[in-house]
Image: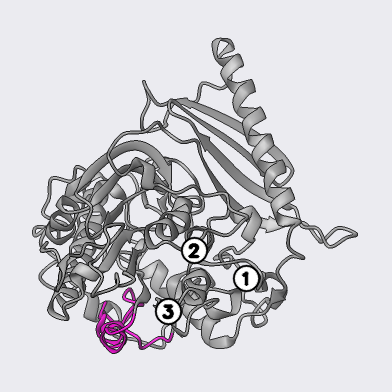
């Protein structure tokens, strides 16, 4: 990547001053979220198939975090934590429940979700207040305006035809987002782009539909056009049509699903190339911090499931995170971090003060590649208890994981039943052997219980700084998007 020269000496973003004849330009920020993308599906993270030539080339110029973990295993809370630097139990924005019964119309009492408190600073609101134009182009569904994702954006486009939904009839097409970026080229901008590719069903367009499994002749649908040929068909029927033929005991079916997912990853990678090439063509490459990440991963029966049902094992939370920062060289960072650290990181890079209440920590000090592992807590809230006498909220159906340098501790309370798991990642990196009952680990277990309890109490205090988000009912168009994505049946 070339460096932009000033008329009076060299000007480099991110901390190197220009000459007196040209003030330093505020850098643009482009945040690209590729939904449902496991880190290990990319070449830069070890995938041997050619799923990600664009990302891999980008990573060679970027600061790559090898062990970035999501704060949640599902879309809405993970993204809201990225945009606020707060834990899901603090910002309280959660996914719509995919298992709602739609017997007599929509169950509005259960689909009502909490909206982000308007006083909670977001990355967009902080940058807008400091002079950035802000625009978001997202895939809709669980990223919708009603729950607060539009907070701080001058333009918030979550319409079904914006080219970002990607996993239905439309393909991933960033043209509308790029038109907005071009319109903002003379002023600093923050653009947030989110696509649901490679979210299930895994139906990449040609040639990626057969690229990684050309010989498959089983019953799982492979023809995208045929699968979406009946636009009025309900998602429940489509879900059954895609997943119904899957034989969970068949290694061949599992191989095909992984290959189809890899094809979707490659398709998303091609769209990433379109974005990055356009940025260079517009002359913005050297003035723009580009961040590529995902909200959560995807499971292929590692713990008995497909997709991402809210579990928090490693395949659900290990995500890619790479930042290309003009004026800073590439690096590989081995330290464990969380994606909720992104907000303070970006604000430090562009010289904007961070909000006073944060749980994320800036990653800039790790950019050289050193640094120690950070404990990372991930949360899935399935439901909330009714508000207390002072309006306080407490999750009553919840899952937590706490990962230290060596251990993963899982605590869940579902249906008033508590459960613990403990994994020694030095011997068991895939988190498959629960050792919490082993007497030799009693001391470790006690410390991790205590650490999680302190986190939960801290989250309660931070939540108390706000009155709490108002309950909202999602409009019919948003519900339709959620149904199309499989979160509402």
Q: Quadrant of residue 293?
A: bottom left
Mark found first going from the N terminus, 1 or 3: 1
Q: Residue furthest right?
A: 389
Q: Secondary structure at mark 1?
A: loop
Q: Is residue 203 at least partly visible in the picture? A: no
Q: Nearer the viewer, residue 283 or 455?
A: 283
Give the left or right position of residue 67, taking residue 55 as reference. right
Residue on which disc 2 sits: 83
Picture residue at 50% right of the left edge, 82% below the top: 480
Callouts 2 and 1 close, C-beta under 8 Å: no
Residue on which disc 1 sits: 101
What is the x, y in percent for residue 345? 42, 54
Label 1 and label 3: CA atoms lie apart by 37 Å
Residue on which disc 3 sits: 134
Label 3 and label 2: CA atoms lie apart by 13 Å
Q: Is residue 31 above or below residue 299?
A: below
Label 2 and label 1: CA atoms lie apart by 31 Å
Badge 2: residue crowd in 10 Å (few <14, some 14–19, many ≥20): many
Is residue 167 a member of the stretch shown in magenta? yes
């Amino acid at each position: 990547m070339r460096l932009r020269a000033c008329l009076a000496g060299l000007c480099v973003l991110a901390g190197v001053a220009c000459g007196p004849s040209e003030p330093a330009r505020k850098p643009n920020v482009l945040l690209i979220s590729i939904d449902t993308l496991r880190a290990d599906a990319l070449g830069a993270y070890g995938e041997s198939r050619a799923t990600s030539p664009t990302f891999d080339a980008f990573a060679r110029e970027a600061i790559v975090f090898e062990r970035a973990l999501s704060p949640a295993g599902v879309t809405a809370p993970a993204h809201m934590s990225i945009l606020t630097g707060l834990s899901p139990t603090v910002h309280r924005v959660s996914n719509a429940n995919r298992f709602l019964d739609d017997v007599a119309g929509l169950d509005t009492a259960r689909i009502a979700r909490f909206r982000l408190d308007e006083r909670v600073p977001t990355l967009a609101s902080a940058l807008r207040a400091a002079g950035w134009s802000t625009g978001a182009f997202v895939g809709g569904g669980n990223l919708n305006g009603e729950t607060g994702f539009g907070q701080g954006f001058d333009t918030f486009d979550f319409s079904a035809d914006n080219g970002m939904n990607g996993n239905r009839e439309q393909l991933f097409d960033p043209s509308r987002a790029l038109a907005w970026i071009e319109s903002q080229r003379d002023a600093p901008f923050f653009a947030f782009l989110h696509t649901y590719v490679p979210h299930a069903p895994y139906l990449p367009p040609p040639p990626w539909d057969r690229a990684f499994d050309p010989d498959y002749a089983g019953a799982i649908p492979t023809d995208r056009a045929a699968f979406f040929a009946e636009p009025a068909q309900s998602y429940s029927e489509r879900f059954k049509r895609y997943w119904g033929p899957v034989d969970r005991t068949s290694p061949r079916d599992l191989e095909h699903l992984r290959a189809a997912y890899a094809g979707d990853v490659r398709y998303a990678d091609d769209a990433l190339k379109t974005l990055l090439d356009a940025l260079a063509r517009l002359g913005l490459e050297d003035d723009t911090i580009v961040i590529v990440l995902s909200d959560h991963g995807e499971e292929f029966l590692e713990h008995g499931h497909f997709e991402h049902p809210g579990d928090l094992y490693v395949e659900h939370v290990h995500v890619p995170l790479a930042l290309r920062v003009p004026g800073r060289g590439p690096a590989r960072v081995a330290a464990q971090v969380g994606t909720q650290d992104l907000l303070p990181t970006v604000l430090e890079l562009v010289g904007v003060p961070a909000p006073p209440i944060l749980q994320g920590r800036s990653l800039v000090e790790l950019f050289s590649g050193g640094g120690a592992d950070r404990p990372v807590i991930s949360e899935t809230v399935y439901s909330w208890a009714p508000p207390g006498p002072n309006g306080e909220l407490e999750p009553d159906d919840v899952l937590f994981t706490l990962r230290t340098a060596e251990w993963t501790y899982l605590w869940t309370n579902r249906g008033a039943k508590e459960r613990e798991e403990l994994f020694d990642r030095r011997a068991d990196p895939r988190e498959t052997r629960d050792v919490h009952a082993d007497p030799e680990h009693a001391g470790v277990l006690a410390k991790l219980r205590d650490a999680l309890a302190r986190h939960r109490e801290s989250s309660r205090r931070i939540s108390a700084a706000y009155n709490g988000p108002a309950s909202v009912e999602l409009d019919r168009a948003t519900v339709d998007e959620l149904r199309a994505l499989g979160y509402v049946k």
